[in-house]
Image (spheres, grey):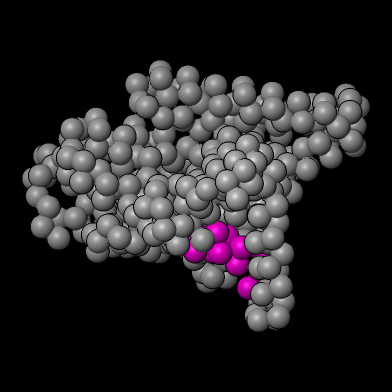
Amino acid sequence: MEYIITFLDKNGLVFAFLVTGLIMYFSEWISKTLTRGKIPGSAISIFMGLVLAYFAGLETLGKKGIADLPGFSGFELMGGPMFRDFAIVSTAMGASFAIIKKTGPIGVLSLFLGVIISFSVGSIIAYAMGITDAESLTTIGAGACTFVVGPVTGTALGASSDIIAISIAAGVVKSILVTIGTPLIAPYIGLKTPQSAMIFGGLMGTTSGTAAGLAATDPKLVPYGAMTATFYTGLGCLMCPSVLYFLMRAIL
Amino acid sequence: MLLRGVALLAACFVAGQILGETLGRFLGIQANVGGVGFAMLFLILSQNELEKRGLFHLEMGEGVNFWSKMYIPIIVAMSSVQNVRVAFSNGLLALLAGIIPVIACLALMPLLSKLAPKD
């Protein structure tokens, strides 16, 4: 058994292709038989990935989902940021530059609104639950932006490690919620045009959540949503530890 | 020809990401600012430019297309390496701070969509 696991870890990426293929095949089957095609197979396979990650996390107490299981280490590479960003960029081929240029200004507006609203609502919730110092409130508000903005802000302001952990968890909850919720809510918020996808990407920000959610909604929308979402984390890291922190101190 | 497409994609990726990293440094923050977005713009612009000059072969497009079709499998792999356990075990505050801001932002969608230019 030992040598098989060593073999699988050594050839991790190839094994990850195989397992992902099986997950997708199984999800396609569930989509056809159990939901009669109502829920797309891609949405089910993304959800299954999250479920597997949850149980793997319970089993190993690790941080990397099923990549922490013996033999499954290749998932870290296949699901890591390099391949993710490479694949996102490739979806831009055939996207319309004219639409991106025309929707650009409103995309920028949605980015600023997305960061400011997530931050404010996140820190108001933290305040309501008994947290009162400016550093912790700012860190949790930043975590409500994305799971990168939270720890970057917390580290810059010297917040305690349990507050930083909460901010990361809030960001991960957001990313999972956007992943699962986007295809379900898309018809109600008019998420069907490239323009609306750009606004959505700016408001939500989480690149992984937005990209996965849009992929399950309509793959043609992915490049437009990813285009704005990719600026969100940078903008959040820029505003949270500076302008928004100073504002927070002025208010308290 | 196929690999030229992949190489073009890789060139756009590297250029865009380095620009994003540099911009982050320049702004004094520990994050990549829009690297993926710049890379996408480079890809769109270089494809247009190559097509105009008749240098964009169908097979080059296939090299890029392969990766855009790999997109969903990669996202499935990505979701299976998330720290889902922490998201659900870090208490009510993390859950609420993750969920309510999303709802607040979604409420703005219809308003912003009205402001967007039509095709």
Is A41 magenta? The answer is: yes
Q: Residue at x 41, y 58 (%)?
A: A59
Q: Position of residue B83 (x, y in %)?
A: 41, 51
Q: Is residue A239 visible?
A: no
Q: Position of residue A39 (x, y in %)?
A: 63, 73
* Residue A50 higher or lower than B25, as above or below: below
Q: Is residue A170 visible?
A: yes
Out of A131 and A2, give the one closest to the viewer: A2
User: Horizontally, is B48 left or right of A72 in the view?
Assistant: right
What is the quadrant of residue B98 in the picture? bottom left
Majority secondary structure of the magenta segment? helix
User: Horizontally, is A151 left or right of B56 in the view?
Assistant: left
Q: Quadrant of the C terminus of chain A?
A: top left
* Residue A94 higher or lower than A66, as above or below: above
Q: Residue at x 66, y 75 (%)?
A: A30
Out of A163 and A16, give the one closest to the viewer: A16
User: Horizontally, is A133 left or right of B10 in the view?
Assistant: left
Is B43 magenta? The answer is: no
User: Horizontally, is B51 left or right of B113 in the view?
Assistant: right
Tally of numbered discs: 0
Q: Position of residue A246 (x, y in %)?
A: 17, 35
Q: Residue at x 44, y 41 (%)?
A: A232
Q: Which residues are magenta?
A: A39-51
Out of A57 and A49, give the one closest to the viewer: A57
Q: Residue at x 40, y 47 (%)?
A: A63
